[in-house]
Image (tube, rainbow, N blue to C red):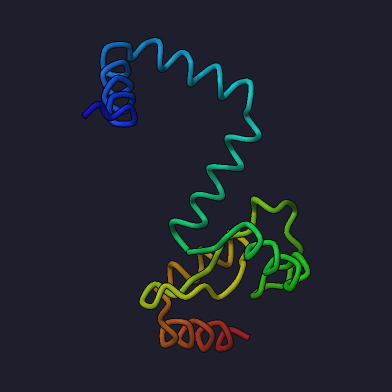
Amino acid sequence: MFNKKEYVKQYTKQYRKDNPKKIKKYRRQYYLNNREKVINETKECKLKRLYGLSHEDWLKMWEKQDEKCLICGKKFIKPSNACVDHNHKTGEVRGLLCRHCNSIIGFLENNPRLMMNSIEYLLGEE
């Protein structure tokens, strides 16, 4: 029995294999014509894939935090500067941090003991 869906799938697969330059040219043109849309869709897919967050979930965090980093309290200059912070062991999302604070947490490997040692070190300088 003829399966149209399977036929189209195989045809498309073969077409892409046989015409990589056409596909690349088309994708490039599509990106240029729809840059904002492509960027936003890519961000939304990444949020969902990495953190299980929808765009609406992210917006709720953004608004709940008053557009500020949870650690330093500085207002984000733009939404793309907000990093989703999460527990690397459990995957649980904790909130939005600025890149600087997110890097600090990353460098300290989410290790509270290292963080406390750092605090004690800095307090010892005063």
Horizontal relation, residue 80 to residue 78: left or right: left
Horizontal relation, residue 91 to residue 56: left or right: left
Instruction: Please give the name of the residue rendered at 73% of the width and 59% of the height, measured from the top-left corner.
Output: 76
In this view, the residue in front, 116 or 87, is: 87
x then y, percent, for residue 47: 52, 56
In this view, the residue in front, 35 or 7, is: 7
Horizontal relation, residue 119 to residue 113: left or right: right
In this view, the residue in front, 39 or 26, is: 26
In this view, the residue in front, 110 or 79, is: 79
Q: Quadrant of the C terminus?
A: bottom right
Farthest-out residue, front: 1
Instruction: Please give the name of the residue rendered at 76% of the width and 67% of the height, measured from the top-left corner.
Output: 63
x then y, percent, for residue 87: 44, 75
x then y, percent, for residue 61: 67, 69
- Whether 42 is drawn above or below 51: the answer is above
Q: Quadrant of the N terminus?
A: top left
Instruction: Please give the name of the residue rendered at 56% of the width and 50% of the height, measured from the top-left corner.
Output: 44
